[in-house]
Amino acid sequence: MRKAALIPLLYFLSLLCSCSPSLPSGILDEDKMTDILVDYHLAQGMAEAQGEDIEINRYKYIQTVFRKHRITEEEFDSSMVYWSGRAEDFSLIYNNVLTRVQAQAQRMGLEAEAANRDRFASLTNEGDTANIWIGKDFACVLANPVQCVYSFLIKADSTFRQGDSFIWRFKTQFVARSMNNEAIAVLNFYYDKDTVATVIDWLRNKPKNEMRHNPVKALDSLNLRTISGFIYLPPVKGADQPKPLLISEIQLIRMHKIVETAKAKVDNDILAIDTLTADTLPKQKGERLSPLQMRESQPRKRTIHVTKENPNPIHPERGIPERTNRRRNR
């Protein structure tokens, strides 16, 4: 009876597998895309590590990746568009990619070298300078009406202070070349009294991006309420649409304003200890006196030494003289 019961179950599973949707023609599967994207990102890292002719080296290394996996650039672009349109599947692919890329970069020494050059690499969410980013470290935007914007919103809490400065840092990478590869990044800071400060930057082929906000004096006395931002990849007319834009290693650095009170405190302590005032110093008039003149000018206590003559001097050879100044007994 048990074997008879298993037959319908196996038949149902076989029908389920046979009904699973197949990939469109020319689209790379998940495993193939993962392998290619790992090499793709490592090629980007090696090109940036060269320090010179980054764009030329990046193009050469990426073409080497395509030749290694025996695919064309068009197949890669089409597959990226397909998978990036499926958010859950694409997120799983990129989680595997980032894990493998970090492991490979550590073995190649690329990650350690980059960390040594990056003073914000090891920041936490605590301290005067902290990374307060709470969103995902990776995102992808496409030039279509649905997936063309990546946005975030962060509300201020008790760790925020008046006069705080901020840096929004992230890496961007278009998956292929296009004349219309251009996105816009906007960062908004909402303060009390309906005051808003905005920072705008255009994203083209620069892999590393930093958007800074240093509040002016008028904002130092206002409390920050909310921070929002977005990256927008606008569609264009024509067949040459912007390629998908990958956003990674996102950070939002908050830096407290340094109040220079320590130096003032030290100065006050020094003044409190130093009791020598100007009134205790002798006033200088005219020309400077020489040491001898200064010594002679000091008041001196004069004494008169009087020596009285002894009326009865003693001469050993004459003996003891008679005391003439003593009254004789009567």
Image (spheres, rainbow, N blue to C red):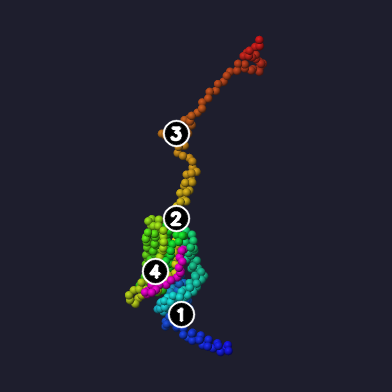
Per the image, the residue denoted by label 2 is 258
In the image, 282 versus 192, the foreground residue is 192
* First reached walking from the N terminus: tag 2 or tag 1: 1
Mark 3, other Cα within 10 Å: few <14 / some 14–19 / many ≥20: few
Circle 1 sits on which residue?
29
User: Residue 251: where, in percent of width, then height?
Assistant: 45, 65
Q: Which numbered mark, 4 or 3, is in the foreground of this view?
A: 4
Q: Percent position (x, y) of residue 174?
A: 40, 72
Say which residue appears at 51% left-offset and 26% top-offset.
302
SS for dot 4: strand
- Residue 150 visible somewhere in the drawing: yes
Q: Which residues are magenta?
A: 131-148
Q: CA distance from mark 4 to mark 3?
A: 79 Å
Quadrant in which residue 325 is drawn: top right
Q: Amino acid at mark 4?
A: Ile
Mark positioned earlier in the residue sequence (2 or 4): 4
Label drawn at residue 259: none
